[in-house]
Amino acid sequence: MAEIKTKKTTASPEAFLNTIKEEKKRNDSFIILELMKKATHSEPKMWGSAIIGFWNSKYTLSNGKENDWFLLGFSPRKQNFALYLTGQKAKNYKKLLGKLGEYSTSGEDDKGCLYIKKIADVDSKVLLALFESHVNQS
């Protein structure tokens, strides 16, 4: 079985976010970072070159092998922000998602990944509540 490629690094999440050229995307990234810090009461870590994650977690593959991962995280992609709510099913958050605003998912309720284009498209208070709910259920 292949080794997982995305691993926790010692790189600075803030330095990574400061490399984002588009000012609005960079500012939105720092807002998401602060919301996740508030929800987790912890400091972020870089996972690979473009994912910021909070809390150490593990997931088990079908072959029984465990991999290190994060519980809550995001990546500022070119088209959108990928918000990772790992370890839980997105359908557990239907009530909050109904109040969130404009978002999409990967197409399956159990993937735990939401996509937003910009912070202005969502209610930041609901986004924080979603992050807090995820942390409290895990």
Image (cartoon, rainbow, N blue to C red):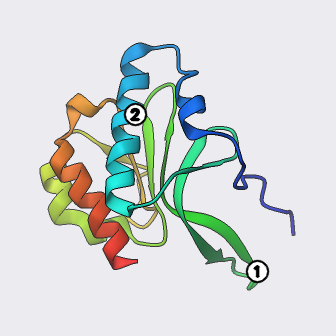
Which residue occupies 59% across, 30% down? 15
Q: In the image, which is nearer the foreground, mark 2 or mark 1?
A: 2
Residue 123 vs residue 107, the one in the foreground = 123
Q: Residues within 10 Å of mark 2 (few under 14, many from 20)?
A: some
Using residue 102 as the reference point, say whether residue 55 is left or right of it. right
* Quadrant of the image containing the C terminus: bottom left
Q: Position of residue 41 (x, y in %)?
A: 38, 61
Name the element at disc 2.
helix
Residue density around tag 1, few if under 14, some if 14–19, many if 20 or more, within 10 Å: few
Left or right of 86? Residue 61 is: right
Residue 100 rendering spot, x and y as whole percentages: 18, 48
Instruction: Answer left or right for 32 relative to 51.
Output: left
User: What amino acid is at disc 2?
Assistant: Phe
For residue 133, the mark is: none
Which residue is rendered at x = 70% and y = 46% of the image?
Answer: 48
Q: CA distance from mark 2 to mark 1?
A: 34 Å
Q: Position of residue 122 (x, y in %)?
A: 21, 39
Residue shown at the point (42%, 72%) measured from the top left: 88
Residue behind mark 1: 65
User: Which amino acid, by three-letter code, is at mark 1?
Assistant: Lys
Q: Earlier in the sequence, mark 2 or mark 1?
A: 2
Whether residue 77 is situated above or below residue 9 in the rendered picture: above
Image-quadrant location for residue 40:
bottom left
Measuring from the top left, give residue 94's x and y in whole percent: 21, 64
- Looking at the rendered structure, which numbered label has been put on residue 30? 2
